[in-house]
Image: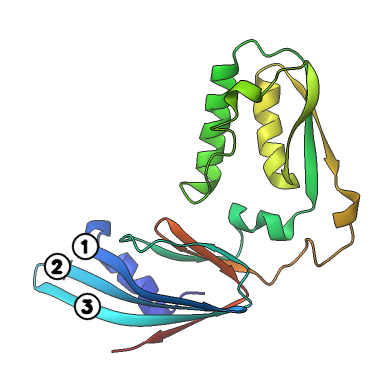
Amino acid sequence: MLPEELILLQEQFYEDDIIFLTTKAAHIAEHFSIDFSIMLQNDEGSTSQDWNIAISGYQKCHFTFEPAYELKLAYEHPLLWEFTNAQAELYYSGKVTDASALLYDLYCVHRSLFNSNVPFPFAEKTDKLFLFSSGLFTTGPKQLLEHYGAILQKHGLDYSIRIDPASVGNPSLFGSNELSVLLLGDSFIVGEQFKFKRLD
């Protein structure tokens, strides 16, 4: 979990008064290191703190150096599903009466799950979706496909989810409970261990 000092800082300062600025990031094999500064502003003036995060068991990241206003470490999050869920295929059947409305609802549920951390996968495929009355819609972690399937059903389509047999019982493909995800604004890093160290 986050150090108590970082938790208290985010509780004590308003979002606009605390900014996380990444100053350095390095990735070597299964290790990732981040240096960042915390800029704090209140009625008494401004102060700053310098921190390092050492990540071991690195799996995946989407990283930017844009300012962030919140730092979280999550043990359950949709960003972990590709590592903790069986991979599956989502099939549909039926006639789409309003593809634009369906895609908008898919976008909304995708955004609610991933915020801006993961691009909407259907944004550039709108003219290629639902060309037939049935077929494969998409693939991905089972839990994500259940959310997509609920939207298909809302718009009058039937759906089914088929688990990839290769992922069943294979702990190297899914089922890891040791991973966490660090959320820093629009950046995220998936890894096994996160060690925080104050530098100043």
Observer-nearest of 40 and 68 = 68
- What is the spatial separation of the Cα atoms under label 1 and label 2, in whole angstroms? 7 Å
Within 10 Å of disc 2 (Cα), the crowding (few <14, some 14-19, many 20+) is: few
Within 10 Å of disc 3 (Cα), the crowding (few <14, some 14-19, many 20+) is: few
Observer-nearest of 63 and 174 = 63
**Residue displayed at 45% across by 60% down:** 187
Residue 51 x %, y %: 36, 81
Tell me if residue 161 comes above or below residue 196 in the rendering. Answer: above
Tell me if residue 113 comes above or below residue 42 in the rendering. Answer: above
- What is the spatial separation of the Cα atoms under label 3 and label 1, in whole angstroms? 11 Å
Do the numbered discs 1 and 2 sit on residues whose CB atoms are within 8 Å?
yes
Badge 2 amino acid: Asn
Observer-nearest of 185 and 74 = 185
Residue 190: name its quadrant: bottom right
Tell me if residue 105 comes above or below residue 74 in the rendering. Answer: above
Badge 3 amino acid: Ser
Residue 108 is left or right of residue 178, and the answer is left
Residue at disc 3, secondary structure: strand
Q: Which residue is mark 3?
A: 48
First in sequence: mark 3 or mark 2? 2
Q: Which residue is mark 2?
A: 42
Res. 17 mark:
1
Residue at disc 2, secondary structure: strand
Residue at disc 1, secondary structure: helix
